[in-house]
Image: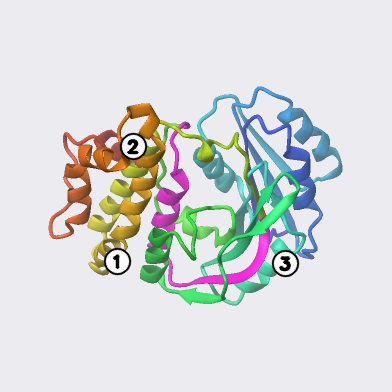
Amino acid sequence: MQEVAVSVIIPVYNSERYLKECLDSVFNQSFEHPYEVIASVNGSTDNSINILKEYSKSHPNLVIINDPINKGAAKARIDGINKARGKYVAFIDSDDLYHKDFLKVMYETIEVGYDIVGCNFYYLYDTKARKSILKANYELNSIKATRALLRDYTMRGYMWNKMYRKDLFTEQKVYYPKDPKTLFEDIVTLYNILANIHSFKAIKTSLYYYRKSQASVTSTVNIERFNHHLYAFCFIRYLCDQNENKAYLKSFRRTFWRTRLSLFFDAYLLRKQFHHGPFKHLRIYKKEIRALKDIKKPLPIEGEVYEQYIKDCLD
């Protein structure tokens, strides 16, 4: 059986509108090494599976996983990883696009010896594209990479604009929220992975197109958005507590201003739903926020509002 350099994993859920564009961008790569494309279908009820079957006739490197139950994008990615044969894995959301050189540039960079490589990306608004904020190439160790993730500035908490050594997912427990409706599931998984690497390389070249629309779940005002974000930070803090290296806790504390800012923004979005401002909403959760910030003692779990979330991630 032919060796596979990279496995590209696409979580698919009712994606018929943009799926063909996505697939075309993945199959029309300048990459010269063998690669496979794994479409992990998760409870789709539209025409997505038929589109994939049609593409498989002309693309023998397309692998289709069809789960009739929607378990969320995180589980779809894990299913794809379990099926993957590549030395490296990359992800793409089913409404997004790869630049034609995505695989070539990312592969050539990670082959130097990095654990993860990340690239800059474009925000895609209908037919217009705008570059993200990454301005420079840089290298980070594990602690600095987790700090950059929590700062949410030069490194965004997305799984898809990166390429990973596959064994980062197969040689350790990978955590993610099990509820398919949970938001911010990427940051939970990504922090877990970054906490177990030696090297991360960021390149400023924009190689990914992230489609933004008003229909996007992450851009919709959702009453659960604040809670999901808070719970995700609580789980990350839990991982910091479990890590024997206290530098991760200190890093979490150093970036807590950014955590608070994220929660403030989520609370601001909910001002019409709850008829009060963001500061009042933050005061409702002041006990949880104080516990997050206090790294001198472990985050309390039992009986807390985020207890079930953490248990679900650990399951």
Q: Spatial distance from mark 3 to mark 2, Cα to Cα?
A: 39 Å
Amino acid at pointer 2:
Asn
Disc 3 to disc 2: CB gap under 8 Å: no
Q: Earlier in the sequence, mark 1 or mark 2?
A: 2
Amino acid at pointer 3:
Lys
Q: Spatial distance from mark 1 to mark 2, Cα to Cα?
A: 23 Å
Q: In the image shown, does 8 or 131 lie closer to the viewer?
A: 131
Q: Spatial distance from mark 1 to mark 3, Cα to Cα?
A: 33 Å
Magenta residues, start to end: 180-208
Q: Which residue is at 42% across, 43% downward?
A: 176
SS at mark 1 in the image: helix
Tell me if residue 65 comes above or below residue 174 in the rendering.
Answer: above
Disc 1 to disc 3: CB gap under 8 Å: no
Residue named by callout 1: 251
Tell me if residue 178 comes above or below residue 201 in the rendering.
Answer: above
Binning the other alpha carbons within 10 Å of mark 2 as few (below 14), some (14 to 19) or many (20 upward) gives some
Q: Quadrant of residue 279?
A: top left
Residue named by callout 3: 104
Q: Earlier in the sequence, mark 3 or mark 2?
A: 3
Query: Magenta stretch containing residue 184, yes or no?
Result: yes
Q: In the rendering, at what x and y percent does residue 254 appear?
A: 28, 66
In front: label 1 or label 3? 1
Q: In the rendering, at what x and y percent does residue 309 appear?
A: 32, 37
Q: Quadrant of residue 232?
A: top left
Amino acid at pointer 1:
Ser
Q: In the image shown, does 17 or 122 lie closer to the viewer?
A: 122
SS at mark 3 in the image: helix
Q: Which mark is residue 227?
A: 2
In front: label 1 or label 2? 2
Point out the residue furthest to the left here.
Answer: 297
Asked if residue 174 can be seen in this view, the reply is: no
